[in-house]
Image: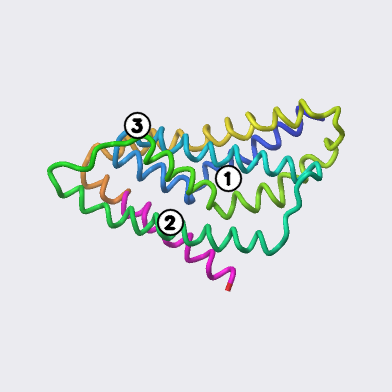
Amino acid sequence: MSTEIWFALAATNFAASIAPGQNVAFVSAATTRSGFLGGVASLAGILFAELVWVVLAILFAIGLLEVSPLFIHAMQLAGGCILAYFGFSILREMKFSKMEQAPAFRFTHYAAKGAWIGLANPLALMFFVALFPGFLLELTDNSYATTLMLCVPVILLSSACGLIPWMAATRVLTVHKGIANVVNCVSGTTLLVMGALVFLQLF
């Protein structure tokens, strides 16, 4: 049973990760901006956020953490604000592509932004609060602690496998400066739209 759950989790999370969305948009923008290092830094931040979400989801599934509807709405509202802010930031930073020298690359800068994007992801919130516990309904006994803990690397690995192809494809495509500007524009706009959709859903 545990193997089936791991495969189901991996497949579901991989499908969510590889689908175009805010994580893909930010990884693409970071890769366009600073090459593979930017993509890796943003991916590291997103995976850290996934780690936080999966630990909280496990605590929720085994009854050690309660989540109120008010908390979920507050997180969605905050997430919408963060997505819109970073979308605007990416569009605003496009002006550096016209300058001779862009700001120096900082790994922690992209990693921190990636973490915020991952934490603000409304799809991740719904997956880990609503769907993830459903996979673990039969694993709430303490004897399944190992199975629960192994869910963590399964989630992180499937997320990485979903985002790495986008990072590689973006790097190949954005060798041409014109395409790089298009990717930045699409990525920033995607984050803005995702933030707006969160607000529309809430209000």
Magenta extent? 184-202
Q: How far across and how far down the image is residue 81, in percent? A: 47, 61
- Answer left or right for 85 relative to 58: left
Circle 2 sits on which residue? Answer: 191
Q: How far across and how far down the image is residue 106, in percent? A: 32, 36
**Disc marking residue 36:** 3
- Answer left or right for 49 relative to 4: left
Pointer 1 with pointer 2, Cβ within 8 A: no
Q: Is residue 19 magenta?
A: no
Q: Mark 2 Cα within 10 Å, few/some/many (few <14, many 20+)?
A: many
Q: Amino acid at mark 3?
A: Phe
Report the Cα–Cα distance between label 1 and label 2.
16 Å
Mark 1 or 2: in front is: 2
The answer to which of 193 and 67 lies nearer the viewer is: 67
- Say which quarter of the image contains residue 105: top left
Q: Amino acid at mark 2?
A: Leu
Of the two numbered discs 1 and 3 on the same chain, state the one appearing first in sequence. Answer: 1
Report the Cα–Cα distance between label 1 and label 3.
22 Å
> Can you name the residue that lies furthest to the bottom here?
203
Q: How far across and how far down the image is residue 114, in percent? A: 45, 43
The answer to which of 10 and 47 lies nearer the viewer is: 47
Of the two numbered discs 1 and 2 on the same chain, state the one appearing first in sequence. Answer: 1
User: Quick one: SS at disc 2?
Assistant: helix
Residue at the location (39% across, 36% down)?
108
User: Quick one: SS at disc 1?
Assistant: helix
Q: Mark 3 Cα within 10 Å, few/some/many (few <14, many 20+)?
A: some
Q: How far across and how far down the image is residue 2, in percent? A: 79, 29
Of the two numbered discs 3 and 2 on the same chain, state the one appearing first in sequence. Answer: 3
Report the Cα–Cα distance between label 3 and label 2.
21 Å
**Disc marking residue 16:** 1
Residue at the location (58% across, 40% down)?
50
